[in-house]
Image: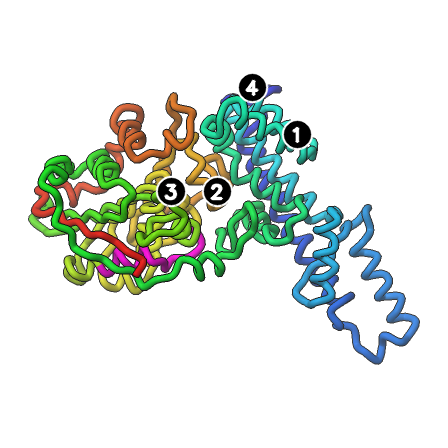
Amino acid sequence: MPETDSAPDLAGLHDLSRELGEAADAVRRAAQYTSELALGGRLPARALGTGRARAVLRCLVGTLTDPAGLGWAFDGRRPAARIAWLAGVLTSRESLAVSLAVAGLKARIRAAAVSHPDLLTDPDTGRVLRAIEDDRQTEALRAFRSIIGSRGAERAFALLAPSFGDILAWNALTDENPFNDSTGWDIATGRTLTTAEPLFGISSRIWALLDRGPGRAEPVAPDPSLLERLDRSGTLVGYVRNIGTLGAGGMLLVQRVTGPDSVTRYVVQLAGMATDAISKESPQDVLGAIHAVARTSTPYSRAVTRALRTLVPSGTDIALIGHSLGGITALNLAADPDFCALYRVTHCVAIGSPVDGKRPADSGTRVFSLVNQHDVVPSLEGRSTVSPYALPAQFSEYTWTDDTHAFPLCHAAERYAHNLEFDVPETSADVDAALAPYRGRVAASRLFALYDR
C-alpha cells in the first residue's frame, strides 16, 4: 500500500514495534537487576546498618516505584521481588517496561490495519482496536463480545485474525492475571511460545502432564471405497484433499512413491485436531494441540514415529505434510534430532498451523507455511502473517485471503485445498516444484490408527 496520510509506512511501523519491544526487554532486565539489589539481599549485610547503605536502599526502592520513572517495576526470581511484582499485577500498577511493550504491540496492530484495512473500516473491529489504542480494556472486551453476539464468533475471529496474537499479548500484559505475563512478554518481544498458552497462562508443564502417553500406532486395513477416494497425483492439492478425506479421527496416511529418478520416497500426511472432545484416546485432541505448540515431543509425534519405524527403512527421504495440529506435529518431528537421525526429512509443509517458532534439526530441511490470513489458528503461537519478525531462509511462507471471512470454515482442510487449487494456484505450483522428487507413481498407501497409549 502506498504511503499516504491515512496509510502509515508499513516498514516504519514494523521497525518501531521491534525497537519498542527491544527497549521494553532492556528496561525489564534493568528493573529485574535493580529488584535483586533492593530486595534480593545483594547489598552486603554489614553495610545495611550504615546510613549510606540505607540511603542507597531507599534510592533503589524509589527507582522501582516512581510513576515518572520505571513505574511499579519490581521483578526477579527472589521471593521478595516476586511478591512485590505480584502485588503490582493484582493492583494494576503500571511499569515502564510494560508500557513500552504495549506500545510496540499497538504499532504492530496498526501495521496489521495497513495490510488489512477492514480491521479499522469495519465498525465493530474498528471499535475494538480503537479501545485497545486508548487503553480501554473493558470497552474492548465488551466490543469483542458484541461482535460475537451480533455476527457470530466465526466472523469475529476471522476479522481479528491478523492481530489476534498481539491482542492476546496486550491483554496478558495488562490484566490482573499473573500467570499469562510471561507469554505476553514472549509475543511482545518476538520469542517462541514455550512457557504457557496466552489466554489464561496455564503452564506448558501442566498440558504435558495432562497429555501423556508413549504413542501407539496400529496398521489399518482401509475400506476399498476410501482407497478409491485417495488422491495419487503427488500434488500439494492432492495431499491436502487426502488429509480432508482422513478427517480428524486419529488416522495417519503414508504413501510410498517411486520418483522420476526411480528412487523410493515416502510422503507422510498428518491430519489436524478433533474438536468433539478435550481428551480422547487419539492424540489428535485439544490437549494434544495445546501441548504440541510448546513442546516437540508429544503422543502424536511419538505415535507417528512408531508407525514409520514399522514401514519406512532408516535413511529414507520423507516429506511431512500436515494440516493444523498435523502441521505442528510435522515440524515437531522435523525438529527432533533423533527422528532426523532415522530419516532424511527433505520437506515439511504446514497448512494452517502455528509453526513459525519451530526450527528443523536438519538445516537442509525446507519448510513451507501456508496460511489463509482470516484463519486465526496459525497465530496462536504468537506470530501473525503480518509480523515484523522475519522467518529464517529455511522457511517459505505463503499467505492469502479469500471471500469466506469466517472461522473455522477458512481453517478446514477442504477449504485450504480449494484455495490452493483455485485462488492461489501459483503457491501450489511453487510447492509442487519443490516436491518434484516425490512426483511419481504411488506404489502403496498405508493407513495407521494412532493412540495416546
Q: Is residue 305 magenta?
A: yes
- For the residues bearing labels 1 and 2, Cβ distance under 8 angstroms: no
Query: Which mark is nearer the camera, 1 or 4?
Result: 1
Sooner in the amino-acid sequence: mark 1 or mark 3: 1
Q: Which mark is residue 121?
A: 4
Q: Is residue 381 magenta?
A: no
Q: Which mark is residue 131?
A: 1
Residue 329 appears left or right of 407: left
Display coloring:
rainbow
What residue is pinned by disc 2?
383
Sooner in the amino-acid sequence: mark 4 or mark 3: 4
Measuring from the top left, give residue 53's x and y in whole percent.
87, 71
Q: Examine the rendering and report whether any part of residue 362 can be seen.
A: no
| Mark pair 1, 2: CA separation | 22 Å
| Mark pair 1, 3: CA separation | 29 Å
Give the magenta part as a residue range: 293-306
Measuring from the top left, give residue 32's x and y in whole percent.
69, 60
Write the residue at 31% across / 64% down: 214
Query: Which image quadrant for residue 438?
Result: top left
